[in-house]
Amino acid sequence: MSREESDFLVIGSGIAGLLAAIELGRHGTVNIITKKERSDSNTNYAQGGIAVPIGESDSAELHIRDTINAGCGLCHPEVVDFVVRRGEACLKNLIRMGVSFSPNVGDAKHLDLGREGGHSARRIVHAKDSTGREIESRLLDKAKAMGTIRFFENHLAVDLVLESKRIHRPVKPDRCWGAYAMDVVTQDIQVYLAKTTLLTTGGVGKVYLYTSNPDIATGDGIAMAYRAGARVANLEFVQFHPTCLYDPKSKVFLISEAVRGEGAVLRTIDGEAFMKHYHERADLAPRDIVARAADAEMKKRGDKHVFLDATSIGEAVIRRRFPNIYETCLVYGIDMTREPVPVVPAAHYMCGGVVTDLKGRTAIEGLLCAGEVACTGVHGANRLASNSLLEALVFANRTAETALATLATFEGRVPPVEAWRDEGTAVAEETVFFDHDWDQVRRLMWDYVGIVRSDQRLAIASKRMSLFREQVEDYYWKYKLTQDLIELRNIALVGELIIRSAMLRRESRGLHYNTDCPDTDDVNWKRDTVI
């Protein structure tokens, strides 16, 4: 078995992982494990931008208020304050690294600021409609130029290396020494050891049938951390993006909320603007309300989609501000400057995750988390648009500080670890049952644990998912590992954890709406759901 050792191990190559690695690489050696190509991440798909209160009519206090209002009572105020007030410094750091953001038209000295749902002011710094791609490419260039950082592409983390497993007895608190990871090309499993491990594995979108996330978003970090003994929280709060391009023959393509921020309107198939019936801010209402409204209109009328009408924005603004969205729609035969775009809600962002403190620490010593995989307390029951990249930036820096402090006091060496053992396992002759179960898990989550839930739906989902999990665990111990089997194991576990969290919360709040508990209960449930 190959053994790779470094001061720091980063699992995931999105904005949080890359930025943390760059900071860490200035002081030690860093190995980055990434599932596919190093640029394949949720960051790369982020169209909107970074919410930073730098406008003349804006303030940190307004941004904090908007974030807490969107979070429906579950945001941790001290964490929101911490993140918002560090946003401008993080933005300037990106600019120093060469990230190019869109300037204000007619005033190139200032950045153009967009507006999205839930925001009371224009504060979305963006690079047209490809912000994530711009940030990712610049950070990758920076990381690749550093001799202290090594990338291991097409590598899939299998499980964390724990002190308790190494010495075969309980350890409290347990300690992480890295991870086992599979080279998906050779299917060899190697051990990657480090003094500190940082999980930046992104989200869980592929747990659902329809999602705006890339194929790699299978909840691996949450699953690995939970199996290792870390706490997870608020997994019932899955954010469904209300406006994803509807085309039954293609993967889901996200239409940024910024399009509504510029004046686009949601309409039923017969042309009625319906959001005014659901919220005082109409099309600029928070995402949970917009997604439920679109879902309700579709179900009420039996329609497969609603329309997003951006024609009032004007062709010049659309082509300048949203060139990627405009061109993609044209590929599907839709000219959004002249006709409405068919859209549907799709799973988009996990507001919960692995519980961390203000330093990015988990309950497992030596294991830190940042980005979508973490539950820091910023998002509460509903993420405010474009706060995700902001949170990732702030906590990437914070976890780097924590990891460097650990390195400064570290004594001794990383201990020896057993090689991965798979004696007695067989090579699966057929993979059809893996494919079938993968599809079943995702359909089950979409049909029973989606935008609107009920006690009966959750009970059915719980029973069926338990059977899936039992079957998948049997596969896991019986057969030699493949990428499909590892990811199937992870989405089944994360699906089960989402269901458990949803069943525990006996109210409706933010992104969690249960028709059998339609009211918000601040007396009993104004708290995190921790497993």
Image (tube, grey):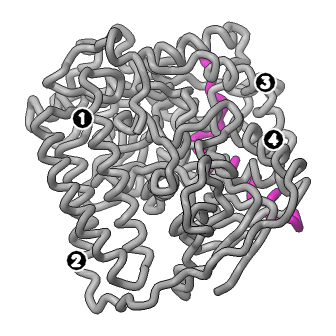
Q: Which residue is mark 2?
A: 433
Front position among marks 1 and 2:
1
Amino acid type of the residue tagged 2 in the rendering: Phe
Percent from the top left, x then y, of residue 404? 84, 47
Reading the chain from its start, which is encountered first: label 2 or label 3? Answer: 3
Q: What segment carries the magenta color? A: 122-149
The relative height of residue 320 versus residue 146 in the rendered view (above or below) is above
Tell me, yes or no, whether the highlighted magenta stretch contains residue 127: yes
Amino acid type of the residue tagged 3 in the rendering: His
Can you tell which mark lies on residue 503? Answer: 1
Q: Nearer the viewer, residue 109 or 106?
A: 109
Q: Which residue is mark 4?
A: 401
Amino acid type of the residue tagged 1 in the rendering: Met
Label 2 with label 3: CB-CB less than 8 Å: no
Q: Residues within 10 Å of mark 1 (few under 14, many from 20)?
A: some
Q: Which residue appears at 13% of the width and 24% of the height?
A: 516
Can you tell which mark lies on residue 383? Answer: none
Q: Which residue is mark 3?
A: 110
Secondary structure under the numbered disc 3 in the rendered image: strand
